[in-house]
């Protein structure tokens, strides 16, 4: 090899990852295709007997971007290869190792092969069903059975669902998310990054956050919880038995959701969430879990006020069931949805809300809920959190009607 290899820290992190599935989520010009090329070269060098699979979102992308980037790097490193792109069978052979080439447009055609590793380009724009098909091809024991995805973000789709919570130090043996920003690439031409920032309407625009910063962004509608920032608001939280635990409770027949919140020195700390579904989605099971989780804690339920009359579990109301089990259940009056949501945003903006990384559903709802969404269909545990914040530190003074409620 005659070329000196220079890698960005995020690119090196991807190549050194020991997780089974890693996603390199990066902005335009960060070097995703370059990193993919070196992952392929790494696999060929380490596992010469294992067949590989390279996929891209479309056939034109596979030919014009993915394979162009790979072959250019192979030529720069003087690594011999042969490639067949015509007909139904598309392959590249590098130093005797065969690698299958497919687009994800017609993913059913990928069935039947067995490979030891996979590299996927711009997969966030492919269907989840296509990803499931290619993952089923990882059966060649001569390889590490690892998958490396390289992509720009595409809103809150399956990539968010699969890798949510597994970025940076939170990576696991199974999943690893590496985020790269366009500006991190010191090899870009002068003025390239600045021109893109201007094109996308400034760094605060959702498009810039997605295309330049590699962030998950909802571009179709404005975010409801616009003040949420994972880097600022997600930190380790542990229950402190010296303080009251407030249980935000949302009652739903299909999804019974709650969260455990402590209010300490003006800061809300969310340490745990619970979402019960199926046969377990009832108030009895929710109550049993609260009592089991919080044996040593002083606890108070701040519930959805409709549970006073609604009976999701028996002839008793949801509030009556919890009180009969010994729980202190506050009398509440549900605020207007916008008031509750704004209360959460104000707490986030002022740095008064901290959420434990284990509360993945709360984090997802805060990040992904859009104005066009029907909140009751896609968000439950964030609603429960809002009940607590509005009860203890409302955005506005309580209305005259709410003052008349006996607590």
Image: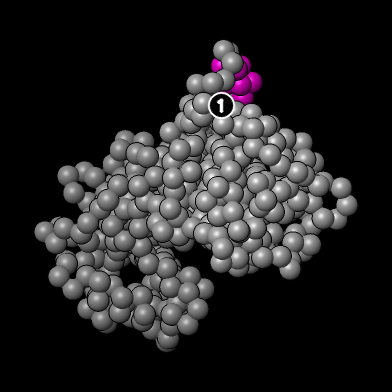
Q: Is residue 333 visible?
A: no
Residue 279 at x, y percent in the picture: 47, 82
- Is 369 magenta? The answer is no
Give the SS element for disc 1. Answer: loop
Residue corresponding to mark 1: 3
- Would you call the spot at circle 1 few (<14 residues within 10 Å), some (14-19), or many (20 or more)? few
Specify the principal SS of the magenta part: helix
- The extreme bottom residue here reads 315
Residue 29 at x, y percent in the picture: 60, 28
Q: Residue 353's image quarter?
A: top left
333 sits left or right of 215 in the view: left
Residue 244 at x, y percent in the picture: 18, 60
73 sits left or right of 304 in the view: right
Q: Which residues are magenta?
A: 192-200
Residue at 77% x, 64% y: name it: 108
Residue 190 at x, y percent in the picture: 57, 12
């Amino acid at each position: 090899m005659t070329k000196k290899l220079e890698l960005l820290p995020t690119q090196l992190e991807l190549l050194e990852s020991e997780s089974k599935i890693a996603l390199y989520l990066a902005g335009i010009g960060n070097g995703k295709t370059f990193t993919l090329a070196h992952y392929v070269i790494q696999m060929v060098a380490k596992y010469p007997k294992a067949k590989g699979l390279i996929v891209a979102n479309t056939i034109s992308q596979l030919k014009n971007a993915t394979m162009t980037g790979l072959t250019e790097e192979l030529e720069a490193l003087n690594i011999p290869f042969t490639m067949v792109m015509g007909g139904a069978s598309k392959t590249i052979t590098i130093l005797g190792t065969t690698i299958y080439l497919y687009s994800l447009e017609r993913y059913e055609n990928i069935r039947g092969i067995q490979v030891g590793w996979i590299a996927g380009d711009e997969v966030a724009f492919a269907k989840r069903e296509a990803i499931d098909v290619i993952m089923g091809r990882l059966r060649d024991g001569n390889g590490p059975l690892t998958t490396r995805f390289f992509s720009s973000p595409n809103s809150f789709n399956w990539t968010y669902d699969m890798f949510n919570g597994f970025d940076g130090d939170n990576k696991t043996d199974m999943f690893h998310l590496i985020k790269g920003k366009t500006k991190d690439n010191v090899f870009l031409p002068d003025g390239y990054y600045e021109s893109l920032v201007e094109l996308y309407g400034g760094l605060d625009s959702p498009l810039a956050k997605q295309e330049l910063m590699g962030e998950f962004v909802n571009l179709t509608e404005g975010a409801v919880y616009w003040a949420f920032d994972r880097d600022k608001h997600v930190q380790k939280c542990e229950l402190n038995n010296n303080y009251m635990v407030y249980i935000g409770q949302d009652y739903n027949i299909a999804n019974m959701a709650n969260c455990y919140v402590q209010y300490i020195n003006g800061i809300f700390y969310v340490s745990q969430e619970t979402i019960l579904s199926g046969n377990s989605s009832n108030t009895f099971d929710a109550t049993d879990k609260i009592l089991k989780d919080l044996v040593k804690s002083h606890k108070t339920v701040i519930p959805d006020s409709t549970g006073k009359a609604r009976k999701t579990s028996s002839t008793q109301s949801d509030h009556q069931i919890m009180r009969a089990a010994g729980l202190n259940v506050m009398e509440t009056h549900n605020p207007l949805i916008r008031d509750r949501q704004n209360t959460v945003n104000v707490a986030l903006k002022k740095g008064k809300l901290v959420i434990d990384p284990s509360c993945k559903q709360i984090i997802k709802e805060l990040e992904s809920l859009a104005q066009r969404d029907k909140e009751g269909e896609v968000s439950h545990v964030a609603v429960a959190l809002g009940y607590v914040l509005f009860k203890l530190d409302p955005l506005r003074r309580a209305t005259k009607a709410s003052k008349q409620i006996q607590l």
